[in-house]
Image (cartoon, rainbow, N blue to C red):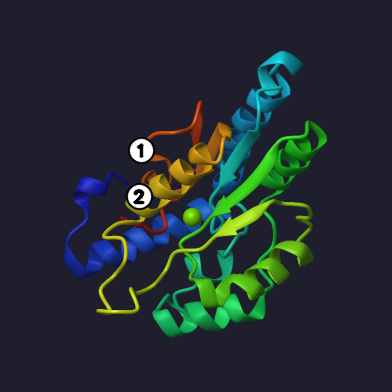
Amino acid sequence: MALSKFHHQESREQLLELLIDYHNSGKYDEDLNRAGELAIDHIKNMTCAEIEVKSPAITLDIDETTLSNDWNLVNPANPYNADSWDKWVAQACAPAIPKTLELFDLAKERNIDIFFITGRHPEQKQITEDNLTKSGYQGWNEIFTEPRFSEKNQFLVFPEAATYKTAARWSLIQRGYRILLNMGDQYSDIKGDFADMTVKLPNPFYFIV
Ligand SMILES: [Mg+2]
């Protein structure tokens, strides 16, 4: 069904149905795998000389890139909101996205440092580390979490996710790293500079500016 045919409330329901079908038919997983393979092939095909730069690194987003939050993407009975999201994160039970775990292990094998740059907040860092470990990720270098407010004036520290994520990559460059690959499911994960290659994973379920 063409998206242009959707109207108002009915359209919203039809769109939801379409997304649920995309997810449950296995097509979402197929697309995730295909994009993940691009990243894996990129690292696999690099020569030792290409990797043996001073400090090679990759940067990964977490939600819908490293961990899957399927429960909430396609369950109209349990829609996303700030509370349900925080409760889900606190359970630390999101499974790994298989191709990303494969990429992660390959990077470790090739002595490439691994950094997570997530929109999750500093108070969620420990629980996120627990979740990553439980789902099979071990041996990353550091997790960047996004500060929620500035302490002084309670304004958002970064106006957009892309600004924060670009700044985090820049801080790695400042520390002498070369980012061989940056991967995320949002355009705000890959917008901006400071990586040799970017891979965008599919996510038609939500959009983060
Ligand atoms: Mg994400």
Determine if residue 32 is in view: yes
Alpha carbon separation for disc pair 2 and 1: 7 Å
132 or 5, nearer to the observer: 132
As drawn, the label of residue 162 is 2
Pointer 1 residue: 192
> Does 100 appear above or below 109?
below
Find out whether the residues at labels 2 and 1 contact each other: C-beta distance under 8 Å. Answer: yes
Residue 5 lies, in percent from the top left, at 20, 50
Farthest right residue in view: 109
Amino acid at the residue labelled 2:
Ala
Farthest front residue in view: 175
Amino acid at the residue labelled 1:
Gly
Residue 175 lies, in percent from the top left, at 55, 41
| Residue occupying image coordinates x 35% and y 38% | 192
**Number of other residues with Cα within 10 Å of mark 2, as a class: few under 14, some 14 to 19, many 20 or more:** many
- Which image quarter holds the C terminus? bottom left
Picture quarter containing residue 181? top right
**Number of other residues with Cα within 10 Å of mark 1, as a class: few under 14, some 14 to 19, many 20 or more:** some
Residue 172 lies, in percent from the top left, at 53, 42
> Does 51 appear above or below 10?
above
Q: Is residue 63 toward the left or the right of residue 47 in the image?
A: left
Residue 22 lies, in percent from the top left, at 49, 51
> Does 34 appear above or below 143?
above
Determine if residue 25 is in view: no
| Residue occupying image coordinates x 72% and y 47% | 101
Picture quarter containing residue 124? bottom right
Q: Is residue 144 toward the left or the right of residue 103 in the image?
A: left
Q: Number of marks in the image?
A: 2
Farthest left residue in view: 8
User: Regarding mark 2 in the picture, which secondary structure is present there?
Assistant: helix
